[in-house]
Amino acid sequence: MPAFLHRLGRLAFRRRRRMLALWLALVAAAVVCMTAFGGTGKLDNTFSIPGSESQRALDRMKTDFPTFSGTSAQIVFTATDGQKVSDPADSARIRAALGAAASAPQVAKVVSPFDAHTISADGTTAVAQVRYEVPQSALEPNALDELKSAVAGANQRGMRVDVGGSAFGNAPSESHRSDIIGVGVALVILTLTFGSLLTTGIPVVTALFGVATAIFGALSLTGTVSISSTAQSLALMIGLAVGIDYALFIVSRHRFHLAHGMEPEDSAALAVGTAGSAVVFAGLTVVIAMTGLTVVGIPYLTAMGLAAAGAVLIAVLVATTLLPAILGFAGTRLTPGPGSRAMRREQAVGGAGEDAVGATGDSLAGGTGENVLSGTGDNVAGGTGESVADGIEESVASRTGEIVAGGTDEHVASRTGEHVAGAAANAAERWFRLVTRRPLLTLVAVVASLGALAWPAHDMRLALPDNGTAPKSSSQRIAFDRVGEKLGPGFNGPLLVLADTSHSSDPTTAAQRVAATIGALPDVATVGKPVANPATHTALIQVIPGSAPSDPATKTLVNSIRDDRAAILRDTGATVQVTGSTAVSVDVAAKLNSALMPFAAVVIGLSLLLLLLVFRSLVVPLKAAAGFLLSIAATLGAVVGVFQLGHLGGLIGVDTTGPVSSFLPIILLAVLFGLAMDYEVFLVSRMRESYLRTGNPLGAVHSGARHSGRVVTAAALIMTSVFAAFLTSDSTMLKQIAFALAAGVLLDAFVIRMTFVPAVLALTRHAAWWLPKWLERRLPDLDIEGDRLGPAPAVPESVALTPSTAD
């Protein structure tokens, strides 16, 4: 693969105008297709599980009880100033408003609160039902706004009117502001990383190309495929994040080559062949994990997985084709200026060598008896507070006149110009040296802290979001809270029981007995009068739970009704099915719970296999899997703490607690797995490269930090910022996903990859890179880092001997 990508990068560099024209044409074609065949107005936010009991009942209700089969809205009338809704004036207003609501677009039926007896005990609140024969996704764009306008006339002095209900649930959330915030933060981080506005703009421009192609392409399919607004937003945030990160990895390698005198065309080709190989590998892991969501069998989740996978795949294609073309347009302008901080930093990384490999090839190694040998005398740096001592792994044996010197700017220099400069160690390397000084203590601290953060996850409750988590000032949230307060929480999520009485001797009596049996169950507030369809011998019974839709007691009630179906059949001759939005939520959660552990096993098994192939080691894959599990557990604990327990929720606009979205754990597993592979490959591959060249395990860990730490840090900060920008969303589900991904990347990158990983490698030493000979012979060599493409550019002696104060 590196050889192919090397040729592809060179071709794109040379044919840059044609490549740019091709991508412009792709974006234009996606826009045209979206305009002609799809668009945001056709997004489908309906939850369904084909084949589940709740879905089978809903499908039958479309023919037997069409006015109950679609979505519904609630109109909540609240009398103020000491009045009651039954007062003549208020009653007249309500009836007039209901008449106007009946003429609103797509309304099938309006049920008066005076007929349904949905009036609070104190007489101040009345709730009318508005029924549609279509699901929420099939409502016209202005249908709910027209309903609000129709009843606005009753909103006068002495009465308040709020409109809510399930028809408002999962409404599309605008994410344009989040896009701007994420791109803005990424620009700041890239500017600080590269110190060049031109270099800063390239990753952002290429990422926008990829995101535009992916999003417009997905929207062009909404006319024929069900795609939710959450799927669109997930693809947008992941596509933007990985698009910038993938370009960052390649551009940083390109700048390194340019700083050491390589021609732009050769540099771009080599950068795509080396860093590009890691990009392809990391991107494909994300694609595989996201497409794996299709096996769960939930269309809503399938669309999310495929949309995100498509965005990542396009980001990989952009990074390996369009990016080298743009590098061709930039030419030598990306080369750091002579004497600039960026040039000093690149020279310091290139000239630092592998922890003092001298003219004889002996490395400055600890504990193994290796010495620094030089014919002219070597200096040992101690200015950074990292002592050279026999007991610490970095001893220096003075057998041929080497000088061990203290001071503030000491360094190890050999005849070939290779040196170790304490002052030249960047922040990442200094951190790695700190955490590897006492690796066992570091591991205990990491495991203890992440374990404490993960603890709340043991009490995680899963459910689909409802209007109880909508923005506090929204009409649907006000209506939800008012109904729960005045009529009981179960009125916000009634259950529908479909009874088939075709085998009963007296269908009417059978339906009444079914209603009586259900009414005797715990946590049942009220049971409505059965609505019969004599033609199909079915009856529909509305059951009001005593608890809220997302309360565990409501789930228990749904399961209790289903568990009693055998007894109901024996006593009445009727078969029953439980459906409604609350039952659908219960079925979705159950389906996802059953799929979570098998999916996690597949993801972890895949990570072990892939890392075994890439690093040809047993310890590295096991360490990566353990770190991945720690970061997942800690992230879920943080989500529970913020959204379910309410800790610090006000900082991100969470004004009420509630269950975690049923989709979140499995989405987090899929996305974070792929993103964790990014940092694992880019960081550890440099360590392995150093170890194979020097045989110094501790020096290899420090070398990985020196070469990749700064870029991995910047990439993680960019990805975290892009995800965090979506915390401004009004959608609770999207807010939870954004928080989980931002926290997950932050924990995985800085606690696991930048702390846990070097500590494990420092503790296991040579064993970290060991693989049984029989297994090594049978494994293919993927050559992710492109070793067979040839050596990196040599560092001139003048460069290596240049003192550096780069950070």
Image (cartoon, rainbow, N blue to C red):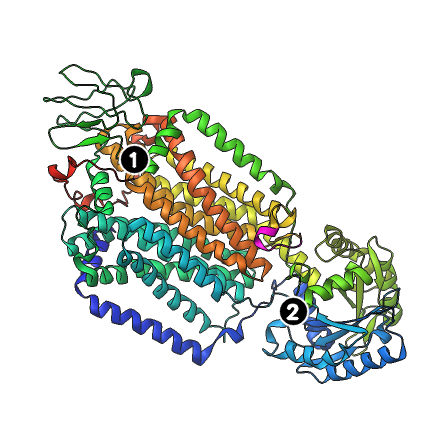
Q: Is residue 612 left or right of residue 424?
A: right
Question: Residue 407, percent across and down?
Answer: 25, 23
Q: Quick one: 510 or 503, which is closer to the camera?
A: 510
- From the top left corner, tell me how far across and down residue 190 is, in percent: 34, 53
Which of the 4 image quarters holds residue 412?
top left
Label ID, residue 674: none
Q: Which residue is mark 2?
A: 168
Location of residue 268 with respect to 633 vertically, above or below: below
Q: Which disc is residue 776 wearing?
A: 1
Place residue 350 in its image quadrant: top left
Residue 421: image location, x then y, percent: 23, 31
Quadrant of residue 46 in the image?
bottom right
Front position among marks 2 and 1: 2
Q: CA distance from mark 2 to mark 1?
A: 58 Å
- Seen at 67% across and 54% down, the residue is 656
Q: Which residues are magenta?
A: 650-656
In the rendered image, residue 528, in percent from the top left (x then y), is placed at 84, 67
